[in-house]
Image (spheres, helix red, strand yellow):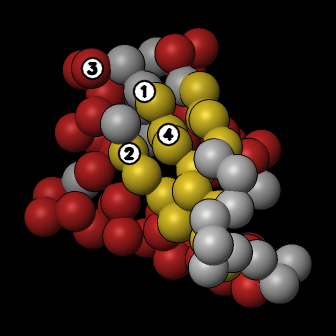
Amino acid sequence: MEELLIGLAKGLVNEPDSVSVTVDAPDEEGVIVYHLHVAENDIGRVIGKQGHIAKAIRVVMRAAGNRNNEKVQVEID
């Protein structure tokens, strides 16, 4: 899952070496939170106009989580 998020983000940004992901342990509801970190000048590329790209990233991650029976949430930091 982490590799999927990194791959998606690296395809969008100008500085792919600055992409990193941290993963929180599942909370009491079983939700795993992935924190995506990118360079400051690439945040707009990852979020997109009106958040459309960020929403698409979250949809893809949630679908992949469903295949693995995991509840997934993505935060862009």
For mark 1, give the secondary structure.
Answer: loop
Q: What residue is shown with label 3?
A: 40
Along the line of sight, which residue is nearer the eye, 14 or 22?
22
Percent x, y of residue 4: 73, 52
Quick check: marks 4 and 3 in contact, CB under 8 Å?
no
Query: What's the residue at 59%, 27% (across, down)?
Result: 20
For mark 2, give the secondary structure.
Answer: strand
Residue at the front extreme of this rendering: 28
Query: What's the residue at 37%, 19% (across, down)?
Result: 39
Q: Quadrant of residue 77?
A: top left
Badge 4 density bin: few <14, some 14–19, many ≥20, Cα 10 Å: some
Q: Nearer the viewer, mark 2 or mark 1?
A: 2
Percent x, y of residue 13: 43, 31
Q: Cα distance, mark 3 to mark 2?
A: 11 Å
Q: Cα distance, mark 4 to mark 2?
A: 5 Å
Along the line of sight, which residue is nearer the eye, 48 or 37?
37
For residue 8, say whether it is visible: no
Quick check: marks 1 and 4 in contact, CB under 8 Å?
yes
Q: Cα distance, mark 4 to mark 3?
A: 12 Å
Q: What residue is shown with label 1?
A: 38
For mark 4, give the secondary structure.
Answer: strand
Q: Which of marks 3 and 2 is in front?
A: 2
Q: Earlier in the sequence, mark 3 or mark 2?
A: 3
Q: What residue is shown with label 2?
A: 76
Q: Which amino acid does label 3 sit on?
A: Glu
Badge 2 density bin: few <14, some 14–19, many ≥20, Cα 10 Å: few
Quadrant of the image containing the N terminus: bottom right
Query: What's the residue at 62%, 65% (across, down)?
Result: 27
Q: Which amino acid does label 2 sit on?
A: Ile
Q: What residue is shown with label 4?
A: 36
Percent x, y of residue 53: 35, 61
